[in-house]
Image (cartoon, rainbow, N blue to C red):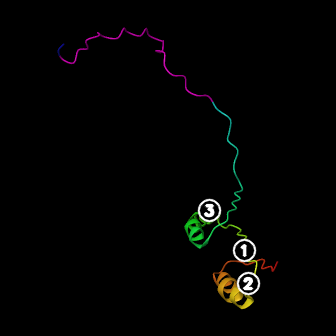
Amino acid sequence: MRNGASAVGPEPPVPPGTEPPGPIPPGPGPTPEKQTTVRISFSANRQQLFAAWNGLANLADDAGTVNVTVEARKDEGFDQVWLRNAVIEPVEESGASVTLVSRL
């Protein structure tokens, strides 16, 4: 074998006007449905909430805005002054549009 010659020999010539067999290109398939809404519901402690928040921020970045509904329960009840100062005011001061604050 010299000058790059193959041990098997040369491939037979392909007659003019014919294509060698090969893979058939895929035809048009079904168009996937657009997902226009995302709904995520989860329970989280403080650490998990901080870890998950970046994912929600990514979603808000892509969608423009997201609607966030938060529900928390404490059997002995929340201190109303703490709730106002530690939760409601910081959310309002964030610039987010607060549409509902309810007391259940």
Residue lying furthest left in this view? 2
Name the foreground residue: 31 vs 14. Answer: 31
Query: How far across and down, in percent of the image, does residue 48 sit?
Result: 58, 67
Crowding near the residue tagged with mark 1, few <14, some 14–19, many ≥20 C-alpha atoms within 10 Å: few
Horizontal side of residue 3 vs 81, given as left or right? left
Q: Nearer the viewer, mark 2 or mark 3?
A: 2
Q: Reading the chain from its start, which is encountered first: label 1 or label 2?
A: 1
Name the foreground residue: 25 vs 93. Answer: 93
Asked if marks 1 and 2 touch (Cβ < 8 Å), the reply is yes
Horizontal side of residue 89 vs 46, given as left or right? right
Distance between the alpha carbons at the discs numbered 2 and 3? 31 Å
Q: What amino acid type is highlighted by mark number 3?
A: Leu
Quadrant housing the N terminus: top left
Q: Which residue is mark 2?
A: 78
Q: Secondary structure at mark 3?
A: helix
Q: What amino acid type is highlighted by mark number 1?
A: Ala
Residue lying furthest front in this view? 76
103 vs 64: above or below: below
Figure quadrant of residue 75: bottom right
Q: Which residue is mark 3?
A: 59
Figure quadrant of residue 86: bottom right
Which range is magenta? 3-27
| Residue drawn at point x = 69 percent, y = 48 percent | 34
Crowding near the residue tagged with mark 3, few <14, some 14–19, many ≥20 C-alpha atoms within 10 Å: some
Query: How far across and down, in percent of the image, does residue 61 sit?
Result: 60, 65
Q: Secondary structure at mark 2?
A: loop
Q: Which mark is residue 8?
A: none
Query: How far across and down, in percent of the image, does residue 8 sit?
Result: 29, 10
67 within the magenta span: no
Q: Nearer the viewer, mark 3 or mark 1?
A: 1
Q: Main secondary structure of the magenta part?
A: loop
Q: Which residue is mark 1?
A: 72
